[in-house]
């Protein structure tokens, strides 16, 4: 069956054909998808920073300190790490397959606004399976959800328009933030585990178009 990959994207024909070819011969290993998807994300989001194996560290919650206070700690030689989103982070390192972030020009006050994560992508491997099993799908969704929760509270490294993307073979699942209020009236954000859809479907096209529009306005 003929498929069409993100027809709205301004990408070379040969790149589109490479990705569409996965429909007939799904890659067994995630590494086979890194190169084409890296190229695609850079072309689809030319105003964003596309970070393959982007470093994502848990936020350091020992104290909520201002960005310039963190810089002061660094100048004093204290053991403090800051990521590109301006957050103090712990030593633990995590590497989603792709992190896509908005980045900004120097502001009028001479400061540098922090990056804002727009999309986190995690890719799984089929290995010898002709199609992903339920356990493989569950595992990749779980891994993605771990990364999404590492982003921390809304407004720190992301806003409500961020999205997580799990890919295995030619199937994709989207993770989106959902707000829930507990019995004490406190609002918590939970990351959903979306239904599995086709990489060549309309929802992929719509989500990529939505993220591109957000980045273009940044």
Image (cartoon, helix red, strand yellow):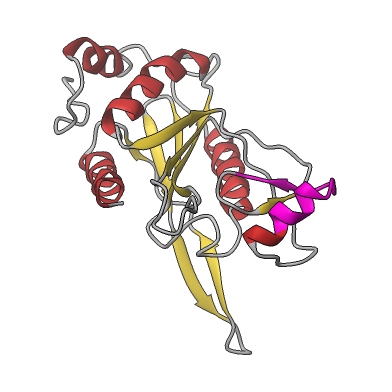
> Can you give x and y, in whole percent of width and height, for residue 96 in the image?
57, 35
Q: Quadrant of residue 42?
A: top left
- Residue sitting at the far front: 109
- Report the residue at 23% width, 43% height from top: 209
Residue 74 is a magenta residue = yes
Q: Is residue 29 above or below residue 148?
A: above
- Report the residue at 32% width, 24% height from top: 40
Q: Is residue 136 above or below residue 70?
A: above
- Residue sitting at the far bottom: 184
Quarter of the image with the N terminus is: top left
> Can you give x and y, in whole percent of width and height, for residue 22 in the image?
33, 16
- Left or right: 186 with respect to 90? left
> Between residues 126 and 87, which one lies in front from this camera angle?
87
> Can you give x and y, in whole percent of width and height, for residue 6 in the image?
21, 31
> Between residues 76 and 16, which one lies in front from this camera angle?
76
Q: Quadrant of residue 198?
A: top left
Q: Which residues are magenta?
A: 70-83
- Report the residue at 37% width, 17% height from top: 36
Residue 153 is a magenta residue = no
- Report the residue at 63% width, 90% height from top: 184
How many numbered discs?
0
- Left or right: 188 with respect to 192? right
Q: Is residue 39 above or below residue 102?
A: above
- Left or right: 18 with respect to 90? left
Res 29 seen here:
no
Res 214 seen here:
yes
> Between residues 34 and 2, which one lies in front from this camera angle?
34
């Amino acid at each position: 069956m003929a498929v069409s990959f993100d027809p709205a994207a301004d990408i070379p024909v040969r790149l589109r054909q490479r990705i569409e070819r996965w429909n007939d011969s799904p890659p067994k290993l995630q590494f086979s998808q890194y190169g084409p998807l890296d190229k695609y994300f850079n072309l689809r989001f030319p105003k964003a920073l596309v970070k393959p194996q982007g470093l994502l560290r848990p936020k350091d919650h020992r104290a909520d300190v201002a960005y310039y206070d963190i810089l002061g700690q660094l100048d004093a030689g204290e053991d403090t790490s800051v990521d590109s989103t301006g957050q103090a982070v712990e030593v633990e390192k995590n590497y989603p397959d792709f992190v896509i972030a908005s980045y900004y020009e120097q502001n009028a006050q001479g400061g540098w606004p922090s990056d804002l994560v727009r999309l986190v992508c995690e890719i799984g491997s089929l290995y010898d399976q002709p199609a992903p099993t339920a356990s493989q799908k569950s595992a990749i969704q779980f891994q993605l959800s771990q990364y999404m929760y590492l982003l921390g509270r809304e407004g720190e490294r992301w806003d409500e328009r961020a999205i997580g993307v799990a890919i295995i073979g030619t199937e994709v699942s989207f993770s989106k933030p959902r707000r829930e209020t507990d019995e004490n009236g406190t609002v918590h954000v939970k990351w959903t585990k979306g239904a599995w859809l086709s990489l060549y479907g309309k929802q992929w096209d719509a989500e990529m178009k939505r993220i591109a529009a957000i980045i273009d306005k940044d």
